[in-house]
Image (cartoon, rainbow, N blue to C red):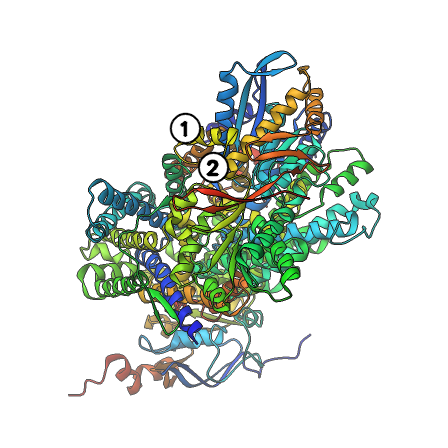
Amino acid sequence: MSIPTEKRPVLEIRNLTQNFGGLRAVSDFNIQLMPGELSGLIGPNGAGKTTVFNLVSGFYQPSEGAILIDGVPTGGLKPHKVTALGVARTFQNIRLWNEMTVLDNIRVAQHYRLGYGFFHSAVRSKRYMRREAEIAREAAELLDIFHLTQYADEFPKNLPYGTQRKLEIARALSIHPKLLLLDEPAAGLNSSDIQELIRLIRWIHEMFAVTIWMIEHQMDVIMQLCTRIKVIDFGETIAEGNPEEICNHPAVITAYLGDDTI
Amino acid sequence: MKRLLTTLSISCIAMIMAVQVIAADTIKIGFNLEMTGDIPKVGESSKFAAEMLKADINGAGGLEVGGKKYKLEFIYEDNEAKAESAVTTTLKLIEKDEVLAMIGPNSTKQAIPAGQVANDNEVVMISPWSTNPDTTFNRPWVFRAAFLDPFQGPMAVNFAIKTFKAKTSAVLYDLSNDYSKGLAEIFKKLFESKMGAGSVLAFESHGTKDQDFSAQLTKIIAAKPDFIFLPDNYNQVALIVKQARQLGFKGEFMGSDAWGSSELMTLCGKDCVGLHFSTHYAAAGATGATKEFIERYKAKYSYTPDDVAALTWDATGVVLKAIQNTGGLTGKLKKDRKAIREGMAAITSFSGITGNMKFNEQGDPIKCGVVVQITKNGEFAFNESICPE
Amino acid sequence: MENLVQNIINALQWGSFYALIALGYTLVYGVLTLINFAHGDVFMVGAYIAFFSATFLLTTLGLPGWIALALCIPVTMILTAMVGVTLERIAYRPLRNKGAHRLYVVITALMCGLILEHANLAIFGASRKAFPQLIAEHVYTIGGVTFTNLKIAVIATAFLAFLFLHWMVTRTRVGMAMRAISYDKFAVPLLGIPLDRIIVVTFILGSGFAGLAGLLFAMSYPVLEPYMGALIGWKAFIAAVVGGIGDIRGAFLGGFLLGAVEIMVVAFFPSTFRDLIAFTVLLLILTWKPTGLFGIAKTTKI
Amino acid sequence: MLRRYSVHLSLATVGGLIVYLAHQEYISLYIMSVLMFMGVNIIMSTSLNLVNGYMGEFSCGHGGFMCVGAYVSSLLGVWLFAGDKVFGAPLLNPKYTLYAFPLLILVGGIAAALAGLLVAIPSYKTRGDYLAIITLASNYIIISVIENIGAIGGSRGFMGMKQLINAMGKSVDLPWMPIWVFLFTVFCIWLMRRYISSTFGKGVIAICQDEVAAEIMSVNTNKIKTITFMVSSGMAGIAGGLFAYILGYVNPGSFNILKSTEVLVMVYLGGMGSLSGSVLSAILFTILLELLRPLQIVKWIVIPLLLIILMQFRPEGIMGNRELGDIFPKLKKFYRFK
């Protein structure tokens, strides 16, 4: 049994700064996400939210500051290594592998714990057979949980948009993450789909006991789900607190509505 | 879709397995030539010369072997200037077309693997043009009509030292062309052994399809050699000589038999006048059979034959002579082919248009070479004849 | 020193041809992201068209050289442009309209090139053609450096062609439409720009300049053969990519860069190592700058 | 039970039949040589499909890797078992040739796989048409290196491989070359099919479809790219080794850009991302080249024209990205493409 991790944050970001050329996309960003938390990150367009996610998932290397996943610093790690530490994410624009079956989409995401390489796949060793069977079984189970089994042999591009979102989340969860980053999960969904999405995220949060951090523009999604929200604008943190506090925070209102004091 | 695939594959297999028709009273000779690919002109010249010879003999009623007249049938196959294609082509000629002997391939890249196959299958092959020793080495069934680099190299060296009074030289050759490279290396070795180490001031190379040689020439001209040795194909010679003149070089060039094409002068023009090269025969001032060949070829195809044409004519002539030497064909392929091989060995002297030749034990010809000079009229005039000791 | 200057002139002349051909590659690529592998052979066709028109003008009509040249330039450019447009109309466009993967169009282009080469071989035979001399050649020697009027003309033409195309692409309506297409092929028709017409213009420009290159090439290296465009075509493609394909400046610079690398390697290293060193240099450049010298790094938006 | 092994059985039957017919000389050497080059072409096109079809890169220097394989396996073979003017007497007794031959070919493949690093490493950063130029440059570099090594013949080529074939024939009197070509062709397809159908190998397809998603979803893209390039060039090396021994002579000029483009055409003719398509197109292409031989020059007008017309009708190649099993579902009973 592992040491209880109650007190250790799943994600800790210290003084994170990111420069693109002369542009400062993120500046001095700090956060601690405790296990089981469901937190939100909001801000106007171009505020640097996705950049933060890209930094956390290892897609960019931070100019300054440190990111720790469960106490492990991710500096210098390639994205797939970060993912193996237990960080999964979805994308603003759905990025499924469109010409690979739904089942294969889940299977390929198991690369971090394949436990075999080219040689085993060539000779079809015992280990290969065992691992492939396990992966196939787990993938099937996962699809079943998400009620996607009927689509297992379909190509994602042929699925309705809402289902694609769901599949992308399922794919992210298939790597058993400690931390799930959702980048605008409600984008492009209609209102009934949004209600279903809220239920889904809530259910995932309980069912998989995963820490969730999400970016979202739909305020009702954020307000209904998140216990803590952080607001950034031009890379700077401008507010932090629970939904109610954020709603009434003057800096947030200014950032969203503009400084229209006459 | 399904049906399409099935029909396609079946028809393909059916066609490939198609049975060949065997005609009586004809002698079939295969030609394995480079008609497409890098050097289409070589294949074309070979084909033209062979066609002319065939028309001659068939026009005279056919080839008389052992008292019986046979019509000639020449089968031309394109080996696309590719080694693998040369092998399948050879096998096709040997097995499917059942030729008695094969002429070609001309270029070494094709001639070596094709020679292997011909030797394994015991069919006489004669390459008109290949100069690489490996083509015929340890292959009793493989012959050639051209002389080898170790003979032509000294020809160029001796002539240049004697006539140009040259003390230094430079070489520009084609790196990817084994003929050019081989000759360049032999030349360098010999020249330096005669004139002292370092007397070859520059030893530069270029690629097969290059068109610009200014960098190499700048380097060569800066070294100020007495002359430039240029064992290159005539089309490149034309460009190289022109560019050297444009870069201000006024000295001599010495060439090899690959210069020997009438096209050289159409391409090169006045820039090449006065230059020398070693070759198989001098077209200008030729006499007898050679003269006749040149004139008829020129009349038929409206250009002076190049060395490949002349060598193919001779190579084919040698094979026909060997067939006659058999003293009669049995119609049994294996036996006839063997008889032709013996017929080849039995040739003590063949007087071809590129000179008199006979074959040594490796299947290489022993014959004389000439050095010619390009005249104002663009003719290749006889200058000196050199025979092997 | 003289050698260096001499080699710089050599490199400029040789690079001019790469640059002129690479311009055609890059224009078509910029608009269609199509590697037009037939371009080298269009160049060859240009040289042959120049040959036939020059011979006709000189021998049949008996015009003086400079008039023949003056007539030859437009004739060659127009006829070659027509060849390019024909290829686009009968081979590329139908495939594009069927929504084929772009690499299938590339392979079709490769096939078109083969057809051009071998049709030429089949029709005109394997004999090489000698290009007639249109203008008298003068060799000038200044301080040990030798050059000819033709070389200067070639280099100047390459620069003029570049300036013209650069002006065309950045300053004219058609050019702007071309650039717009390269940014977003789907939005452009919505803006009322006729996509197919712009593509045709692109092919006219690209092939026209290939024709000009063919004429100049035939004048500088007066030996024509059906395969003459294959190798130089490949190399010009390499030059265009190293410069940053899709960008006119990139193609121009890439052409001169490749010319310079090839000439300078020969000048200062054993010439047998030319391909080895030249291509290693290119490989390193592309490893160092993965989108070529002028190519804009495509940022992946997540 | 029978169904499960039906593929193995039918392959064994076909192979056995070919060997028997060849041994009894029912198949002429000419057709045999066409079949052998067909095998080489199949390996070349399927292995290039791994990179160009499955991984979505545009490699146009496949001939270079073939060259490495051809040279390494022939040099090694001649050095060990034949001996010639370069190497002197053979190191080992030629009677062991038969047992060592597959190893020779494999070593050639491994050497070519290492040469594949020349492309694999830049591919971490460089993509698309820029990578295409790197592959092209590697092709030139490899050929240029070999042309510059005078000891192994340079542009004069290298020979002596025939002695090994003869030595094998002396050990056991069978037509060994067709056997080896057949076995290696089956081996290569089999290996690639296994690779590409494993969860590990599906990473290749993931990279093709969305590299960012692949990397984020824990696929080690650099490793997969390296392995794929190495497998692909390794197979080309195997094909090169076989090619060298079939010909008995190698010359760097045989592996230039023209060879590479020939393979390219086969891949796209068959369909990107379809192994059976590549096999089919290699077979079709080889037969077509052979059948149209009598046309001589015109052949090279007819073939491109045929291909252009074909592409107008099937703009995704013969098979698209489907396998035989997708077109003939009944076949799936006999084998699973998994």
Classify 10 Å Cα crowding around label 2: few (below 14), some (14-19), many (20 and above).
Answer: few
What residue does disc 2 label? B285
Does residue C186 show up?
A: yes
Of badges 2 and 1, nearer the viewer stands 2
In percent of width and height, residue D264 lies at: 49, 47
Is C153 rendered above or below residue A85? above
The tag on residue A105 is none
Q: Nearer the viewer, residue C177 or B226?
A: B226
> Toward the viewer: D139 or B130?
B130
On screen, residue A179 versus residue C73, left or right, reads: right
Question: Can you tell which mark lies on residue B300?
Answer: 1
Can you give x and y, in whole percent of width and height, for residue C10 in the image?
39, 65
Q: Type of residue at label 1?
A: Lys
The vertical placement of A128 against A254, above or below, is above
The disc numbered 2 marks a residue on which chain? B
First reached walking from the N terminus: tag 2 or tag 1? 2
Please indicate whether residue C34 sits to the left or right of residue D88 in the image: left
Q: Residue at x 57, y 83 (%)?
A: A8
Question: Are labels 2 and 1 on one chain?
Answer: yes
> In this orientation, does residue A107 appear?
no
D225 or A26, nearer to the observer: D225
Q: Position of residue B29 (x, y in %)?
A: 58, 25
